[in-house]
Amino acid sequence: MPLKVGKGAMAPPFMVMDVIAAANARQASLPPSAPHVIRMEVGQPGTGAPAGALEAAQSALRSGHPLGYTEAFGLRPLRERISTHISEWYGLPIAIDRIAVTVGASGGFILAFLAAFDPGDRIAMAAPFYPPYVNILTALGMKPVVLPTGPETRFQPTVAMLESLDARPDGLIVASPSNPAGTMLHRDELRDITTWCEAHGVRLISDEIYHGLNYEHAPASAAEFSSHAMVVNSFSKYFSMTGWRVGWMVLPPELVRPVECLAQNMFISAPYISQIAAQAAMDCHDELRANVARYRRSRDHLLAALPGAGFAKLSPAEGAFYLFADISDRSNDSVRFCARMLAETGVAATSGLDFDRDRGQRFVRFSYCGPEADMRDAAVRLAAWR
Ligand SMILES: Cc1ncc(COP(=O)(O)O)c(C=O)c1O
């Protein structure tokens, strides 16, 4: 008798993982003297957690503390520190009962979607998008509504796009700076979208995970414009702590208790040790700003060098550590293009298909968070490959 398999089991893969596997395989096949594979496919900082975070974690381990569960919303001192961080970065007072520590931004999405939406609800987002938005929503029986965007709006959604939908969506996800385009919603644009959502009963989820990695404009938080927006953030990117699996949310007052109940049932808590390290990381800005300065140098170099290497149509790269390149003058099959690029130059990058299923074959995402020397070498190899 065949056993039932749920719709959630049909979530598609995150294709970048296949590129990572191909890059690993190529590296393993190379003789030690050959130039190494340059990793521009991964979206995680090569640096680990800042020194102060490691020290705090080591001293917690040595202390003999049992490091058990915490309250579902996290350790109070960490929540207090996050509240101070929000006031330092955005000048915004947020009561700590609205702050939830989560298992990364990824844990935050599941809590946000379950608390705010029902199966069948329609949730809008710009394409290109971070693939798990669509994959998690679909696994939960919710319906992604994709707004195709391009360079005219810096790959970001607008109020006009929302107005032009046949039916009002139940929710909207925005990400600024975004993955894969590395572009931002500027303060006035985020304000207009947030106030439009509030006026039209559309629940806004603002993914602010790349805040701190911005090169042109200071980012605004959706929480500045509406207390009904759900903000998702993380220690994975600016704080360089991907594997510690810790993030946070700023919750609308009406969703505090529902999210707390969901979090208790689904995760119990984020890892204790990670919360200790995360709190210390919030005082490591010198080290973290040095990482940002390195990203900025790599970005500036690539923006100057890649056009001469045949990648002339690049996203403005206002934040995060991504360049989204329109390669339509070279290929209409970016999966094959990336495979060939890896085989012939040793530079690994991701096909845009992961981020936009309709138009992604025309795009490649380069991540520039790797070592600075590698980013320079990549530009040289790609120019020679042209
Ligand atoms: C836009 C965006 N949101 C969320 C995440 C997931 O973050 P976390 O490691 O905090 O789960 C990523 C990871 O790359 C991302 O790019």
Image: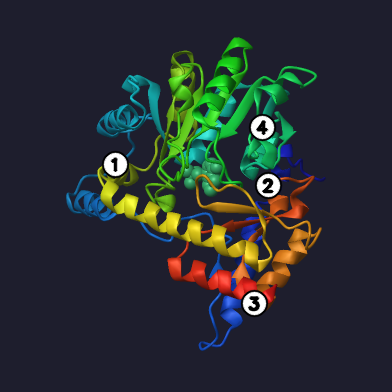
Say which of 233 and 149 sits in front: 149
- For discs 4 and 3, the disc positioned in front in the rendered view: 3
Residue 322 pos. (x, y %): 56, 52
Type of amino acid under label 2: Phe
10 Å crowding of disc 1: few (<14), some (14-19), many (20+): some
Quadrant in which the N terminus appears: top right
- Outermost residue, top direction? 199
Left or right? Give the position of 229 relative to 366.
left
Q: Quadrant of residue 378?
A: bottom right
Specify which label sits upstream in the sequence, 4 or 3: 4
Q: Is mark 3 within 8 Å of ligand 1?
A: no
What label sits on residue 158 in the rendered view?
none
Q: Which residue is mark 3?
A: 384
Type of amino acid under label 4: Met
CA gap, disc 1 and disc 2: 31 Å
Quadrant in which the C terminus appears: bottom right
Type of amino acid under label 1: Met
Helix, strand, or loop for circle 2? loop
Q: Which residue is mark 2?
A: 355
Specify which label sits upstream in the sequence, 3 or 2: 2
User: In this figure, what is the number of numbered marks?
Assistant: 4
10 Å crowding of disc 4: few (<14), some (14-19), many (20+): many
Specify which label sits upstream in the sequence, 3 or 1: 1
CA gap, disc 4 and disc 3: 38 Å
Specify which label sits upstream in the sequence, 1 or 2: 1
Q: Which residue is mark 4?
A: 125
CA gap, disc 3 and disc 2: 28 Å
Helix, strand, or loop for circle 3? helix
Q: Which residue is mark 1?
A: 282
